[in-house]
């Protein structure tokens, strides 16, 4: 599209955007190109992307090393089925993921999105207990305000009261939800452990369910309770993995290791859709009892282009001084956003790593706020009462200051 008025009108009538009505009553902004931390709109205006394209483009856009990885792989093959076949990009990426994650995670299952990673992890947990001849462990324990994806199984472990999936309450499998505090967790495990296949958590930071943080001591207690009551632990690090919270993986804040780990979003540096599920060998061995196999296999599983760019993205991250950069971003966010607490409109300010959140007391007029942000040269995606940023790690201080100033102006 050239971006003419007629084409914008056509797009609004025919192209369905996420979490939106059809036709979409709210404006969408057409992007012509992207480079570094900047999106260039079709009218020529540049805006700083404070969202890292839904938290995935940690290196920014048009990254030479990532471009080269895809171009090189494209000359060999863009895709080949993973059933009965394999290829070097998948092998290389699996080796890297095993190297950088906890030592107990030795098996890698590739999928094509974060939601599907969660689906796979849930199926792994259920099949594990089937392999143990335990037909009672069919429920999952999840945190209040949890968000784990938009597919059916993933929605069932999202908080049915405090999430975007409340519309499906009564239609989904029912599971058990508990606040992230130690006493309530102990009570829930004691009461429900005999029917719990696994607990699934977003470690330390809960994303789309409210951009909430909880203490590392709570996560450590969750691991302890899972061990005590023979319940598997699934860590959903789709949003938190690859440095976002200041640690390479958020589980490191509590020095715990999950039985199953879900990765996605920043895995490919925001270039292509890819996710991975890593497991302890006890999971795969448990599933194999009675000659069972894992009943899952996406068509584009382990896509070679995605695997190649994911390997390049991880290499680029680990070769950089990413810890120092995240600390600098965190310090600047704290200095810039904490003064918002003095506003009568602000309920809370939360900062961790490269995550800055301003929670308002009232729901915001999102279209109006986004238009204001665009005018200030900033792209953010507020929702509900939350005005937040998760910028690319490469953002410069002056660019981050522009995002902070735009947020402050709205409080």
Image (cartoon, rainbow, N blue to C red):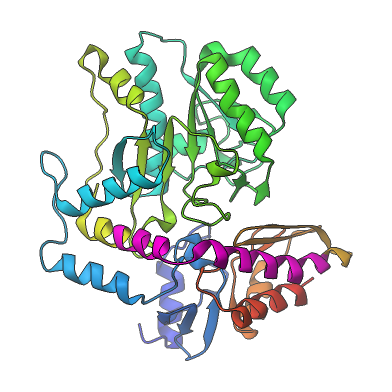
Q: Nearer the viewer, residue 68 or 144?
A: 68
Image height check: is 343 above or below 3? above
Q: Where does the image place residue 284, in percent across and percent down from the top left?
A: 30, 25
Task: State the residue at coordinates (48%, 51%).
Answer: 241
Residue 390 in sight in this render: no
Q: What residue is drawn where x is 41% and y is 43%?
A: 101
Q: Horizontally, is 148 left or right of 305 in the view?
A: right
The quadrant of the rendering that contains the N terminus is bottom left
* Location of residue 10 by image quarter: bottom left
The reply to whether the magenta stretch includes residue 185 is no
- Report the residue at 36% width, 33% height from top: 279
Whether residue 8 appears in this view of the structure is yes
Which region shows up in magenta? Answer: 311-340
Horizontally, residue 66 falls left or right of residue 165, namely: left
Of residues 218 and 164, the one drawn nearer to the viewer in this rendering: 218
> Quadrant location of residue 349?
bottom right
Horizontal relation, residue 399 to residue 271: left or right: right
């Amino acid at each position: 599209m050239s971006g003419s008025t007629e084409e914008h009108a056509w797009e609004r009538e025919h192209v369905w955007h996420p979490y939106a009505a059809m036709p979409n009553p709210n404006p969408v902004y057409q992007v012509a190109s992207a480079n570094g931390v900047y999106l260039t709109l079709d009218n020529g205006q540049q805006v700083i992307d404070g969202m890292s394209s839904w938290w995935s483009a940690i290196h920014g856009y048009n990254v030479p090393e990532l471009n080269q990885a895809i171009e090189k792989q494209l000359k060999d093959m863009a895709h080949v089925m993973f059933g009965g076949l394999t290829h070097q990009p998948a092998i290389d990426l699996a080796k890297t993921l095993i190297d950088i994650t906890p030592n107990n995670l030795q098996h890698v299952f590739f999928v094509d999105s974060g939601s599907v990673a969660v689906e796979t992890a849930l199926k792994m947990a259920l099949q594990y207990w089937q392999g143990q001849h335990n037909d009672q462990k069919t429920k999952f324990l999840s945190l209040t305000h949890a968000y784990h994806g938009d597919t059916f199984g993933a929605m069932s472990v999202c908080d049915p009261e405090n999430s975007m999936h409340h519309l499906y309450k009564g239609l989904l499998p029912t599971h058990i939800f508990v606040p992230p505090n130690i006493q309530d967790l102990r009570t829930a495990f004691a009461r429900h452990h005999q029917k719990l296949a696994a607990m699934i958590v977003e470690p330390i930071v809960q994303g789309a369910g409210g951009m909430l943080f909880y203490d590392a001591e709570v996560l450590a207690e969750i691991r302890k309770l899972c061990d005590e009551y023979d319940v598997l632990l699934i860590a959903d690090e789709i949003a938190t993995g690859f440095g976002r919270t200041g640690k390479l993986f958020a589980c490191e804040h509590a020095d715990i290791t999950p039985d199953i780990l879900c990765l996605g979003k920043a895995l490919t540096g925001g270039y292509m859709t890819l996710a991975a599920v890593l497991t302890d060998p006890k999971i795969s061995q448990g599933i194999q009892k009675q000659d069972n196999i894992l009943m899952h296999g996406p068509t584009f599983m382990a896509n070679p282009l995605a695997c190649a760019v994911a390997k390049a993205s991880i290499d680029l991250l680990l070769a950089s001084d990413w810890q120092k950069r995240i600390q600098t971003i965190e310090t600047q966010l704290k200095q810039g956003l904490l003064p918002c607490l003095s506003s009568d409109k602000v309920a809370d300010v939360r900062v961790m790593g490269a995550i800055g959140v301003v929670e308002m007391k009232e729901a915001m007029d999102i279209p109006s706020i986004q238009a204001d942000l665009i005018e200030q040269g900033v792209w953010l995606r507020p929702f509900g009462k939350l005005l937040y940023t998760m910028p690319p790690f490469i953002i410069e201080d002056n660019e981050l200051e522009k995002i902070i100033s735009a947020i402050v102006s709205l409080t």
